[in-house]
Image: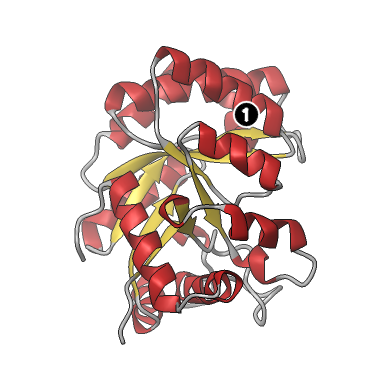
Amino acid sequence: MSISLVDTHAHLDMIQDNASIDEVLARAKAQGVSRVISVGIDIASSSRSVQYTQFFPQVFAATGLHPNDASGFDDMSLSRLRELAASPGVVAWGEIGLDYYRDHTPRDVQKAAFEAQLHAASSMGLPVIIHDREAHEDCLAILRNFSRKSGISGVFHCFSGDTAMAEKVLDLGFFISFTGVITFPKAQDLTDVAKFVPFDRMLIETDSPFLSPVPFRGKPNEPARVRIVAERLADIRNVPTEEIARCTTENAEALFGLKSP
C-alpha cells in the first residue's frame, strides 16, 4: 500500500549535500513524502522558502524570525515578515518562540519578538510553529496569555518535553511534532510522549538538515527520512505505518490548510 507523508518542518535552504532541491524532493517522493513545509528562521531564509513554493508545487512555506535571530527585530523587520507571510504558498508563521539553551539573544528581546509575531500571525489567520528549547514555562505562559486575548493554533515543533509538558501543550489546543530524535536510544521521555499524544494531535517532521534519525544519525538530514519517524511512531503505538501516515497527514492538512499534491 502506498502512503502519503508530510514533512511539516524542513529547512530546505540549509540542505547542502551537493544535490539540487529537485533531487532532494525526488528522494522524498520515492519514500512517500508528498509535501514539505520549508520553514524560515529569519527574513532571508523566509524569502528563500517563499521562492521554493513558486517552483515546486509540493513545497509550502512558513515565514518567521527564530529567537536566536531576534536581536535585530524591529518594526521594519516585522513589516517585511508580514509581506512575506502574505505570499501565495505560505501556510504558517514560524519558526518563532524562545531558546534558553543557546541564549544568543537576551530573553526580554526574545519575548518581545515572540509576542509581536504571535499578534501578526493571529491577525493574518496563520497558525504558528513554535520553537521551545529549555523555555517550557515561559513559552506556555506567553501562549496562554495570548490565547485568552486572541486565540491561535499551531504546533510545538521538535517537541522536547515530557508527558506533563505535552498535556499542557495539548490543553492549549496545539499539536505536537516528532523528529528523528524519537529513534535515539536514550529518548525514553519522548517515547512516553509518543504513547500519550492522541492520534489527532501528532505531526511528523525532519527539521532537515538537522536531527537525522537512526541509522543516519550524525549525517545531514533530508525530508525523505520523515518516513523513518513515521515508522518509529508506528512501532511505539503498535499500529501500521499507514495509520501514522494517514493521521499525521490529515492533521497537517487541517492545521496548515495544505492543498493536495
Residue at image location 52% in from the left, 39% down from the top? 170
Image colouring: secondary structure
Q: Is residue 31 above or below residue 257?
A: below
Residue 249 rendering spot, x and y as whole percentages:
34, 62
Q: Closer to the camera, 40 or 215?
A: 215
Count of marks, rendered view: 1
Residue at image location 47% in from the left, 39% down from the top? 174
Residue at image location 60% in from the left, 54% down from the top? 196
Q: Closer to the camera, 108 or 202?
A: 202
Residue 113 appearing in the image: no
Q: In which quarter of the image is the C terminus?
A: bottom left
Residue 139 rendering spot, x and y as whole percentages:
62, 29
From the viewer's perspective, tell me whether residue 120 is left or right of residue 110: left
- Tag 1 secondary structure: helix
Residue at image location 41% in from the left, 44% down from the top? 46
Residue 51 rendering spot, x and y as whole percentages:
30, 52
Q: Quadrant of the N terminus?
A: bottom left
| Amino acid type, residue under disc 1 in the picture | Cys
Residue 121 appearing in the image: yes
According to the picture, the residue beneath numbered tag 1 turns out to be 139
